[in-house]
Amino acid sequence: MTQKTVTTFVKGLITEAGELTFPADASVDEDNCDLRRDGSRRRRKGIDRETSATLSGFTVSDTDIVSTGNWSNVGGQSGLEFLVVQVGSTLHFYNKATAPYSAALDAATVDLSAYQAVGVAAVSSVKCQYSSIRGALVVASEGMNTIYIERDNATGVLTENTLTFRTRDFDWQGDITTYSEGEVSPAIPRQYDTMNAGWVDTKGAAALASYISGHSSEYPPLNLPWYSGKDADGDYSNTEWDRIFAGTSLIGNGHFILDFFHKDRATPSGLSIIAEIETSRFQTVETLSGRVFYAGLSGNENSGKILFSRLIEDLSELGECLQRNDPTAEDFSDLLDTDGGVIKIADAVGIKKLYAFGASLIVFAENGVWSINGGIGLQSADQIVTVIFSFAEHGNMPCMQWRLAEHQYHTASFLQLHIRGSHNEFIIEAVRNSGEGLD
């Protein structure tokens, strides 16, 4: 007698097919099964305490927010790794060198409430995200100012440091469509833009004063830097300046360096300008190729921005998300491969997670997924942003969510297949319909 296999279940779990068109070899619902990419499945085993488990000295209630992460090369010691556990507003640390982990609770803790930001959710009510670099642990949360933690392995003492994020000011304040012409008695935004374009400091300010004096109190057009009018002695000359035709080009700006979260333009310029405040805080942080990337702001102006540090040589550079050379300088204005900066993904809304995958940085947002690639070390001048998936391309769908911590294997498989361009639509559907969440 010939036997025929009716159902093999190799197609896995499919939840959206109709009864009349339900595909063969698939299931509509499963409990306690671990589905594999090759079509096989295993029984999902129950949870039990580790062998020789030790109860912690702290308690976790049903309402406490809990998150976990890894701290690699703690204190600069190769191979020393801590499990980081957030319970509410407190961080606890377990040494993963020996089993059981539960018996290796470190005595030191970190009180995150000391870094609570103003005007945002309580730090005890939101999950933290973590990343390690040069022996330190960087901690980000939408409820707190981003910090990094150092450990003295000889004494076991932890030291927390609040990060100050500095960026160059590349935002024009006035109407740049008028900047190819001079202007008498310009408004404050035009005055600031002139200074931020290099007409400032000893020689730049002297050039500005000379231009205004020689052009009937008119401010210069911003189509040439001041040093275009230098004479043989290296000083600004109106005569030399007036010989040059610059057209309608717009020169570079970015002389001033500002605190990213409190852009005080009044202090460096001496002008009356209201400070620009960003009240939200970074939700996610990731390390890749010697740099640290920060994202997850909720403000309208900065929602799609990703800040990245310089190539880290010292922990004091963790917040230096800027070009080292002054872009308005005459001699040294080049962008360096080691510089930090800001990446803008205009379409990204609500960035939730940054994930290092090979040489790429994967950006998970509420409305899609992007990949950031570049040269060796994600060089500042070579970064390319590529859309992996967006709702705009695939229509209105239920909110896509991802749990990277719990499902790293599935996520990595999806990204690898997608980046290589293999079976993209199938993988998107498989991940989308599985109902796994992102936090």
Image (spheres, rainbow, N blue to C red):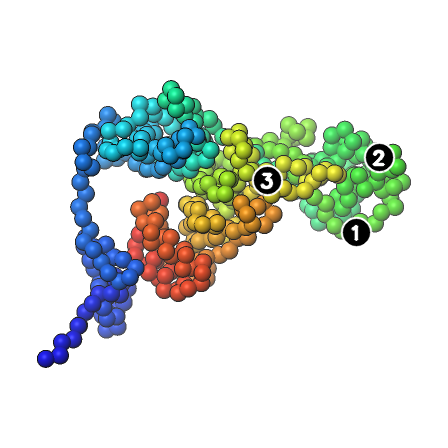
Residue at the spot 10% in from the left edge and 80% down from the top edge: 1
Q: Which residue is farthest left?
A: 1
The residue wearing badge 2 is: 234
10 Å crowding of disc 3: few (<14), some (14-19), many (20+): many
Q: Is residue 238 above or below residue 436?
A: above
Where in the figure is residue 330, as x and y percent of width and height?
75, 39
Amino acid under label 3? Asp
- State the separation of the CA atoms marked 1 and 2: 24 Å
Q: Are marks 1 and 2 in contact (CB under 8 Å)?
A: no
Labelled disc at residue 247: 1
The residue wearing badge 3 is: 339
- State the separation of the CA atoms marked 3 and 1: 31 Å
In primary-sequence order, the first of circles 3 and 1 is 1
Q: Is residue 20 above or below residue 177?
A: below
In primary-sequence order, the first of circles 2 and 3 is 2
Tag nearer the camera, 2 or 3: 3
Tag nearer the camera, 1 or 2: 2
Camera-side residue: 301 or 184? Answer: 301
Q: Which residue is farthest front?
A: 78
Please give left or right for residue 24 compared with residue 205 in the image.
Answer: left
